[in-house]
């Protein structure tokens, strides 16, 4: 299985430059369809999904492929996850609405040893690619986090044993303030007097700020959307795997995002990730 995990991560690094290269020509193009979560899909989302599906689905040992842009899990191998093979869940282009304003975007990947949908605890590795001024890839595997620069389709490690800084500096919370539940709004008032706001509208970019400077990122429950916006399988769980491996914590408001049992491939979940003290305070605030 370890060889397959290597293959998946190398393939993600190999495909990422093509995803990035496909962005300029698709800047303002909607695909004219909605994804399984009912959101409009850009041509860049579709292109990224196709590139990753072709490359990752072709790997021996990848038995299942699921994408934020596809309704159902695709069987891509003869084997089964957990019996030597893995399942790959991907958000091919996270934050693609940032394409119009030319801001950061990412790709999020979870590699599980169980059939999808699967809880975060079944992730053997997770990674995100950040299409910022530099294309980087951050991987959690075997309890440690490594950040690499992707150059010519290859990942070159630039930081090993990445961990959240002890003195948190930044926060970024999604959703409109009037939509936040009262307990979250009160918590946010405290946080904003302690930390500095950094919100870019792409989870990968915002989480990478938290990983770089310490702090907390959240896309909380909203009054109109009690499970928030982000998806457990494609966004919450893999990001939680990375943040927890870097010494931080994650929560759906009550428990680690890695413990949440999925009932649906595209289910949403409130996401809170960052330094442990901030996530613990959040859970205490929501429990009051
Ligand atoms: P997407 O996968 O459809 O791009 O949506 C997810 C993105 C996240 O990257 C980000 O945290 C969030 O949506 C931002 O939402 P908002 O525009 O409401 O701030
Ligand atoms: Mg997304």
Image: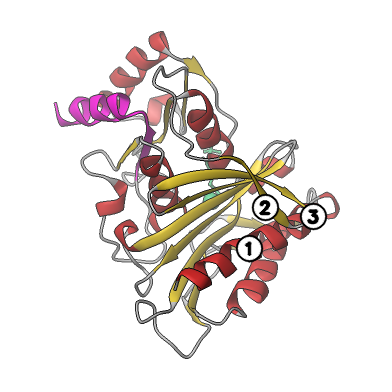
Residue 172 position within the rendered picture, expressed as x and y whole percent measured from the top left: 48, 27
Q: CA distance from mark 1 to mark 2?
A: 7 Å
Residue position for label 2? 155
Q: Quadrant of the N terminus?
A: bottom left
The answer to whether 28 appears left or right of 215 in the picture is: right
Residue at the extreme left of the image, as rendered: 288
Check residue 279 for magenta coloring. yes
Residue 159 position within the rendered picture, expressed as x and y whole percent measured from the top left: 58, 38
Residue 211 position within the rendered picture, expressed as x and y whole percent measured from the top left: 49, 32
First in sequence: mark 1 or mark 2? 1
Q: CA distance from mark 1 to mark 3?
A: 12 Å
In this view, 245 is above or below 55: above
Badge 1 vs badge 2, beta-carbon distance below 8 Å:
yes
The tag on residue 152 is: 3
Q: Mark yes or no: residue 66 visible.
A: no
Q: Helix, strand or loop at disc 3? A: loop
The answer to whether 277 appears left or right of 230 in the picture is: left
The residue nearer to you, when weighing 255 against 85, is 85
Q: State which quadrant residue 80 falls in.
A: bottom left
Residue position for label 1? 10
The residue range painted magenta reads 270-288
Label 1: few (<14), some (14–19) or many (≥20) C-alpha neighbours in 10 Å:
some
Q: Residue at x 61, y 56 (%)?
A: 40
Q: Helix, strand or loop at disc 1? A: helix
Q: Mark yes or no: residue 146 visible.
A: yes
First in sequence: mark 1 or mark 3? 1
Q: Quadrant of the C terminus?
A: top left
Q: Residue at x 53, y 61 (%)?
A: 90
Badge 3 vs badge 2, beta-carbon distance below 8 Å:
no
């Amino acid at each position: 299985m370890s060889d397959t995990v290597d293959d998946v991560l190398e393939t993600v690094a190999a495909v990422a430059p093509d995803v990035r290269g496909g962005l300029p020509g698709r800047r303002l193009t909607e695909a004219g369809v909605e994804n399984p979560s009912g959101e409009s899909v850009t041509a860049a989302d579709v292109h990224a999904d196709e590139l990753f599906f072709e490359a990752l689905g072709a790997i021996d040992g990848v038995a299942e492929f699921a994408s934020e842009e596809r309704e159902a899990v695709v069987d891509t191998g003869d084997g089964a996850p957990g019996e030597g093979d893995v399942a790959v869940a991907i958000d091919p282009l996270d934050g693609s609405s940032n394409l119009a304003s030319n801001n950061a975007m990412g790709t999020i990947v979870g590699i599980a040893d169980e059939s999808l949908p699967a809880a975060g605890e079944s992730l053997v590795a997770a990674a995100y690619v950040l299409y910022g001024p530099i294309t980087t890839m951050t991987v959690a595997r075997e309890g440690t986090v490594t950040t690499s620069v992707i150059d010519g389709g290859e990942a070159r490690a630039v930081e090993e044993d990445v961990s959240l800084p002890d003195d948190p500096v930044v926060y970024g919370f999604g959703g409109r303030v009037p939509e936040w539940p009262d307990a979250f709004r009160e918590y946010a008032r405290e946080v904003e007097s302690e930390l500095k706001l950094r919100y870019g509208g792409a989870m990968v970019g915002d989480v990478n700020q938290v990983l770089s400077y310490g702090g907390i990122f959240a896309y909380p429950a909203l009054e109109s959307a009690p499970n928030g916006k982000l998806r457990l399988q494609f966004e919450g769980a893999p990001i939680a795997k990375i943040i927890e491996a870097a010494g931080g914590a994650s929560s759906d408001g009550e428990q680690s995002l890695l413990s949440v049992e999925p009932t649906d491939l595209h289910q949403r979940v409130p996401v809170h990730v960052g330094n442990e003290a901030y996530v613990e305070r959040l859970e205490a605030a929501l429990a009051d």
